[in-house]
Image: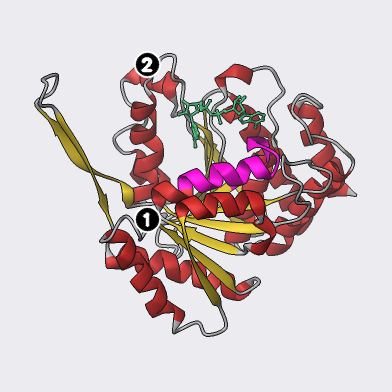
Amino acid sequence: MKTYRLALIPGDGIGSEVTDAAMMVTEAAASRFGFALATESFPWSCEYYLQTGVMMPEDGIETLRDFDAIFLGAVGWPATVPDSVSLHGLLLPIRKAFNQYANIRPHRLLKSVEGPLKADSFDILCIRENTEGEYSGAGGRVHRGNDNEVAVETAVFTRAGVERILRYGFEQAKARRKHLTSVTKSNAQKYSMVFWDEVTNELAAEYPDVTVSHMHIDAMAAKMVMAPHDLDVVVASNLFGDILTDLGAAIQGGLGFAASANINPDRSAPSMFEPVHGSAPDIASKNIANPIAAIWSGAQMLEHLGETEAAAAVLVAIEAVTAQGIGIRPGLNTTDQITAAVLAAMEA
Ligand code: NAD
């Protein structure tokens, strides 16, 4: 029997609650579709940082390298560890070390879920560049604390980085409704974003069956609210994609529904799957976190591992559950009830 090795990093707050839920459903999919999961859990989190002074051990990346995939719950506990420490100590190093340059976030309204918009149907695949751009980490501060203090943060766009994320977007669009929207701010940012537009146009020539729209980030934010049904695949830089996908989560009913995958498309290292949401300290340990985002991220993981039937079955089960009105609003059902309903739907 085919066995996949999974590294689990439940993390902080509701991270462990939703990881448990996602793994129960992923295990159920494995037994139904005839494959096995060998999971190993790592305690890397803010709690771990308080005990050891690091978010993960020095050989953490090497430890993860041999796994087929990584599943992460959520990391962050701002009351005790600054977010810049927890993010730069764990999540970002993993994304960069494993070249997980494509961050994939599906936004669509599941059955019976009422989003804040009048729109009743949209299906957007947001693809966010995940390794460079505005979050490249290039910059510095001088004259700290003085009146002449300077802080510089440099956005870095390489041809290799821009081309590969756009190509990934074109391939996804080709397999879907054949429409790609490239998001920039090339009217104001005349170097990096004009460059991004040029690379988009170069690649467009290779994909004659894909229609391309160029949108500025501000107009795009409005479009996601006014006409989300017009969008298919959306490709954006690290910062723009980060912001747009929180908007995407909001219009699909909230963070409890927003899944994400950090993909290394050439498969030279493991990819990482995690819900978009954070550790939600305000609802941690209350058994009220919505596990659907994490369960959906688990389905993305199965898809990436090649278990496409199992992935589809998980999505069908999630939607069967929301169609019954379960988990569609915060506070309506407990984490355990929603998970049990998805497990029951998997068996049906
Ligand atoms: P958050 O996503 O944790 O929570 C924002 C709001 O959404 C909260 O009111 C929370 O209760 C609610 N929420 C989030 N997920 C939910 C779910 N599954 N079900 C129901 N309600 C849910 O964002 P935040 O409060 O800004 O951040 C908290 C911590 O998480 C911070 O330390 C932050 O840095 C970290 N964070 C981590 C990740 C990650 O690990 N990928 C992502 C975002 C934030």
Residue 30 vertical position relative to residue 53 in the rendered view, above or below:
below
Place residue 175 in its image quadrant.
bottom right
Residue at 56% x, 78% y is 210
Which residue position holds label 1?
Answer: 99
Tag 2: Cα neighbours inside 10 Å, few (<14), some, or many (≥20)? few
Q: How is the image coloured?
A: secondary structure
What span is in magenta? 242-259
Residue at 32% x, 48% y is 134
164 to the left or right of 43: left
Residue 94, x across and y down, in percent: 38, 44
Residue at 34% x, 42% y is 93
Q: Quadrant of ligand 1?
A: top right
- How many angstroms separate mark 1 from mark 2 (CA)? 29 Å
Residue 137 vertical position relative to residue 46 in the rendered view, above or below:
below
Q: Secondary structure at mark 2?
A: helix
In this view of the protein, can residue 273 be seen by the observer? Answer: no
Between disc 1 and disc 2, the foreground one is: 1
Residue 88, x across and y down, in percent: 34, 35
Residue at 19% x, 41% y is 139
In this view of the protein, can residue 12 be seen by the observer? Answer: yes
Inspect the image, locate mark 2, and give the three-letter code of the amino acid beneath it.
Gln
Quadrant, the N terminus: bottom right
Contact flag, marks 1 and 2 (Cβ < 8 Å): no
329 to the left or right of 221: right
Residue 284, x across and y down, in percent: 61, 19
Judging depth in this view, the residue of 44 and 36 nearest the camera is 44
Whether the magenta-drawn stretch holds residue 55 is answered as: no
Which residue position holds label 2?
Answer: 51
Inspect the image, locate mark 1, and give the three-letter code of the amino acid beneath it.
Asn
Q: Secondary structure at mark 1?
A: loop
Judging depth in this view, the residue of 221 and 137 nearest the camera is 221
Tag 1: Cα neighbours inside 10 Å, few (<14), some, or many (≥20)? many
